[in-house]
Amino acid sequence: MHLIDSIKEKIDLVQLVSEYTKLKRSGARYKGLCPFHSEKTPSFVVNDQHFHCFGCGKSGDHFTLIQELNGVSFPEAKRILAKRAGVEISDREYERQDKVFYINEFVQGIWEKGDKSYWVSRGYTEETIKKFGLGWCDQVHWSEKTWYLLHDAGVYKDGKQLMFNRASIPLKNLTGRIVGFGARSLDGQPKYINTPETDIYKKSKYLYGLYESKHSIMKLRSVYVVEGYTDVISLHQRGVENVVASCGTAFTEDHCNLIKRYCNKVVFMFDGDSAGAQATLKAIKTAVACIVTGK
Ligand code: ZN
């Protein structure tokens, strides 16, 4: 049997959808509130192989659902679902993207075991440090065979490790895989070094904290958008868990599309200076345009 079909056969679509929205049986099908757009009466219908929304027109199968709701590519959706179904994917199915994830996760495995004293000195608890995978950018030793991959992943730049002797923050995507890192200096400049854009990390489409916050955002149907990594982490520690950061880039339409699947209220909380005020006005304009045009 083809890989796609055997995955579909092993995973109940109704159960999969139920992780994103509550479904109720309605005749031979199931019905619920659409996870793709905000609505008060259910127009989202699911049968064993297919979903369709009579409100916004979205439709598809297991793979479309995971792609769209988690903002991942088809190969990544396939990987997630194969794992869940217990179906093996052969080596040749792995693509360059997977190798970049692998490099990042290998690095994180080392850095998260590193020195935590900076994070402790900032008042973060052991629980918070663990939840966000905070650590320290130690030197990682590689074989020369992996050099091109290290550059692809943005861990190396011009033959050298980009982040070194800094406090590390892993950047997770919606499925919890690591797409890059932020690294904070203790004294020197620049204050932050971030992974450059790669195949799996695009700043204009990335919101820090969405992985850790998505359940709370879905539950409360609202989100706070803040400026930096540590704003997200500090708020989580204080029990505010529906918060994401745009991390120094302007709030874009792609950012808006990412969060509007989960909530219908956005609160911008940028810095109180005039740059922050300008950024807030721009972000509100972007959000309104995105919602009005329904893109
Ligand atoms: Zn819909």
Image: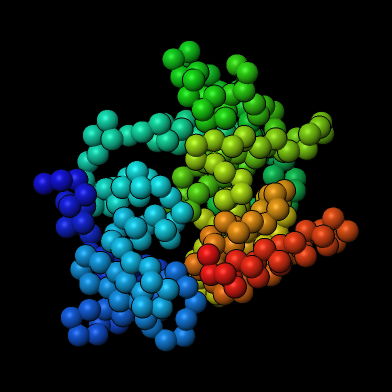
Q: Is residue 184 left or right of residue 44?
A: right
Which residue is found at the position 64% from the left and 68% from the top?
289
Q: Is residue 256 left or right of residue 35?
A: right
Q: Which sits in the foreground, 6 or 214?
A: 6
Q: Position of residue 217 (x, y in %)?
A: 55, 68
User: What is the count of numbered marks?
Assistant: 0
Which residue is found at the position 64% from the left and 56% from the top?
252
- Report whether residue 121 is seen: yes
Specify the color scheme: rainbow
Q: Position of residue 39 (x, y in %)?
A: 47, 81
Q: Position of residue 119 (x, y in %)?
A: 69, 44
Quadrant in the picture for residue 164:
top right
Q: Residue furthest left?
A: 1
Task: Tell me if residue 96 comes above or below residue 11 in the rendering.
Answer: above
Q: Is residue 190 left or right of residue 76?
A: right
Task: Tell me if residue 145 comes above or below residue 70 in the rendering.
Answer: above
Which residue is found at the position 36% from the left and 74% from the top?
53
Task: Tell me if residue 18 comes above or below residue 25 in the rendering.
Answer: above
Q: Position of residue 228 (x, y in %)?
A: 71, 52
Q: Which sits in the foreground, 111 or 159?
A: 159
- Report whether residue 209 is seen: no
Which residue is found at the position 53% from the left and 69% from the top?
294
Q: Which sits in the foreground, 14 or 284?
A: 284
Q: Residue furthest right?
A: 274
